[in-house]
Image: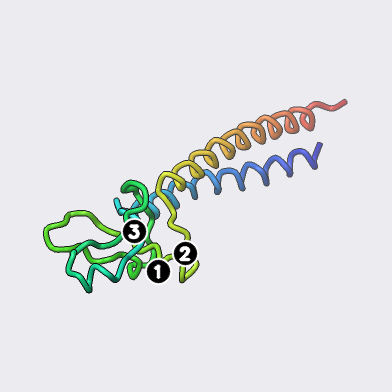
Amino acid sequence: MRFVKWFSVVVLALATIAFLATFAIESYAAGKSGIYQLVEPRTTEDLFGDGGVGTEIGSPQAFVILDEKAVLPSPPGDTKRYLNKTYLDRNGIYPLQLQTVKFFTSTTRLASGIAMVLSAVGLWFAHRKLAKPA
C-alpha cells in the first residue's frame, strides 16, 4: 500500500503541474497569434504591377507566429495580414493554428484532471488501508 500511496502522490503532483501549465501555454500562444491569410508569394506581380501579394491558400485563420519574418507586408489599402508559405517551408516551420493549441491544451486539461481525481482516490484508498490495522 505504501507503493500505491507514493505513486498516487507523484501522479497527483505531475498531473497538477500539467494542468496548470496548459493555461500558461495557451495564454502564450494566444499572445503570439493573429488572423493571417496563408499565401504563396508570386514575384510576377512585382514585374507587371498587379499589386497582389500572391496565391491565397485557404481562408484566413488564427496562426501562432513565432518568427515575424514569415509575415508579408500588406499592399496599401489592404487590411489583411499575410503569411509567407514559401518562407515557412524553406525554414521548416509548420504554420501552427491557435485552434490546434487550444484543442491539445483542453485535452491535456481533461486528461490531467482525470489523473488528479484517480490519484486522489488512490491516495485516499491507500491512506485508509494503512490507517486500519489488519
Residue lying at the far bottom in this picture: please name it.
Answer: 47
93 lies above or below 35: below
Q: Under tag 1, what secondary structure?
A: helix
Left or right, residue 28 beside residue 74: right
Task: Determine whether 122 is above or below 52 in the image.
Answer: above
Q: CA distance from mark 2 to mark 1?
A: 8 Å
Q: Are marks 2 and 1 in contact (CB under 8 Å)?
A: yes
Q: Which mark is residue 87?
A: 1
User: Dots 3 and 1: beta carbons under 8 Å?
Assistant: no
Residue 39 - label: 3
Nearest the camera: 11 or 66? 66
Seen at 36% across and 48% down, the residue is 58
Badge 1 crowding class, 10 Å Cα cut-off, few under 14, some 14 to 19, many 20 or more, is some
Alpha-carbon span between mark 2 and mark 3 = 15 Å
Which kind of residue does numbered mark 2 sit on?
Answer: Ile
**Picture quadrant of residue 52:** bottom left
The residue depicted at 36 percent of the width and 61 percent of the height is: 40
Instruction: Point out residue 115 in the picture as x, y percentages from the top left corner.
Output: 63, 37
Q: Quadrant of the C terminus?
A: top right
Image coordinates of residue 93 in percent, x first then y, are: 47, 64
Left or right: 33 as drawn, with respect to 129: left
Q: Mark 3 Cα within 10 Å, few/some/many (few <14, many 20+)? A: many
Q: Disc 2 marks which residue? A: 93
Query: Of label 3 and label 1, which has the lower sequence position?
Result: 3
